[in-house]
Image (cartoon, grey):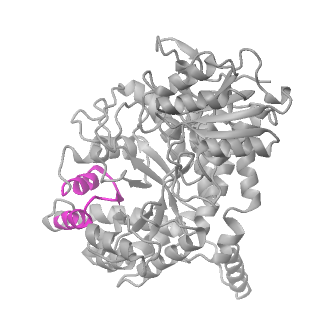
Amino acid sequence: MHDRNLSRRTLLSATAAAAGVVVAASPAAARSSRRDRLLRLISRMSLEEKVGQLFVMRVYGHSATAPDQADIDLNLQEMGVRTAAELISTYHVGGIIYFAWAHNTRDPHQIADLSNGIQRAGLAQPTPVPLLISTDQEHGIVARVGRPATLMPGAMALGAGASRVSAQMAGQLAGAELAAMGITQNYAPVADVNVNPANPVIGVRSFGADPAAVARMVAAQVKGYQGAGIAATAKHFPGHGDTTVDSHTGIPVITHTRAQWDEIDAPPFRAAIAAGIDSIMTAHIQFPALDPSNDPATLSRPILTGILREELGYDGVVVTDALNMQGVRDKYGDHRVPVLALLAGVDQLLNPPDLAVAWNAVLDAVKSGELSAARIDESILRILTLKEKLGLFRDPYVSHRGVDRTVGVPAHLAAADLIAGGTTTLLANPEGLLPLSRLSRPNLLVVGADPASPSGTTGPPTTVLANAFTELGFSATALSTGITPSSAKIEEAVAAASDKDVVVVGTYNVSATSPQRTLVDRLVATGVPVVALAIRNPYDIARLSGVGAALAAYSWTDVELRAAARVIAGRTRPRGRLPVPVQRADDPSQVLYPIGHGLRY
């Protein structure tokens, strides 16, 4: 599509030049012309259409006009409409967000067809306007679009690789695949600096704990995604990295001082803005040093207008985190949240729990004068400017042919494996157990946690790992013991280890009381060498003892597990370095492994 439009422009320019017409315009003149054109479009919108442009909403179903009956029932129950097309014609929403659980992302062709149907519905409105179609495709543990699309390593894995080239390439290729399916706004990269190991919601979704390193990776990903023609979104402003509460279920409080915010939380967002970020997502967190009212940042004018707009100079689109999350609902009712968010400086209102309540609340606020028409038009202009930048007014449609040329193609899959190959971190290898290539065809047992699989997996982690070892020429047996292994499962694993040469244990966020510790202790006691592989947060090694080797994979998606298997087997060398410190379990003030730690062989 890009090449075709370039050819059109070249042809038009050549034709005009032959006719003696000057077609060149200064950048300022072009911006002024675009602004005037979009303002004319806004002037033709009804108030209801304007309010609708501010909302980005979920919808159930694989089709814009003919979803399954179960999805129709859910749409009627939650939004009073049957389909995506009805949602758009009723509420004139400016965007749709895709979720796997909403049955929007079955396969690439279906996603492309859904996107086209949504755009047809947008252009069938009284004032035709294409939609921004968004999703959370962070990669790693958060991926709404799964196989056969290419799944890249997640943020902390990329942070361990520390390659800006790899981070940009991952964004570029992943962005191209999203664009081919008609997804034009990705809620990535995460710009939070994960300085709290107990953070229950960010963790490996962050690039790391070093603000400067995170800033470099965020900027690289922004360039990658937006270089592919989609909008990137830096999240969660003003920084969600030092929390012990999940904003999905409560309201986190950040206790950083203003000076600490400048030093720790701000650099990645500054870097994103310098890289030309198209949108920034807010956080449902209280940050008293930035706003003593303790309003959630999503509803805070001092934070969103005072700091983000005025101090940092950002004039792009600001989108809320999902408004159905508890962190933004605790202090005010659902009818006040969208109005307060707009007053704070937000442009897009994402996924309110009750669209009718939210939509009517904004409509009434404009009619009453609480929200001025100028304030609404300001946000709509930003949204439409982004839509035009992405080419949606020119051609919002995609094709199966474009999907087949782009999504999950061998070159992208190979690039994902190449990038992942630089991320696995070897934390400990006290007696030189690794690489296993030193042993003669060892017989392996793969046990451990099998968390719910993200979209980028072909099966439980133990199975994926065992299959990867088998493909590398080893003999490997998988045994799932779960995140909280029972006594019976632990005994089964111990018995299964009796005739094996090595046991590989996949651990998942091991706590002080986790039965995973008992599992590892019992396996170590058998005398069979044990390799511990952390498949989520890399802090597990601090609570384990006696293992022959310990590594961090940062996720349990196929691409990262295959990379870890290659390192353990000795087919590739470990190149990842810790992007976060691992503290001692018995004394968190002491660092067991610092940022940058990573063994080699």
As for residue 337 lying within the magenta part, the answer is yes
Mostly what secondary structure, the magenta segment?
helix
* Residue 551, image quadrant: top right
In x, y percent, where is residue 469? 75, 40
Residue at the outermost bottom position: 19
Front residue of 320 and 520: 520
For the C terminus, which image quadrant?
Answer: top right
* Residue 89, image quadrant: bottom left
Q: Is residue 479 above or below residue 12?
A: above
As for residue 528 lying within the magenta part, the answer is no
In x, y percent, where is residue 122? 42, 78
Answer yes or no: is residue 36 visible.
yes
- Per the rendered image, the range of residues in magenta is 335-364
Residue at 41 percent across and 37 percent down: it is 240
Q: Is residue 523 left or right of residue 342?
A: right
Q: Is residue 189 left or right of residue 353?
A: right
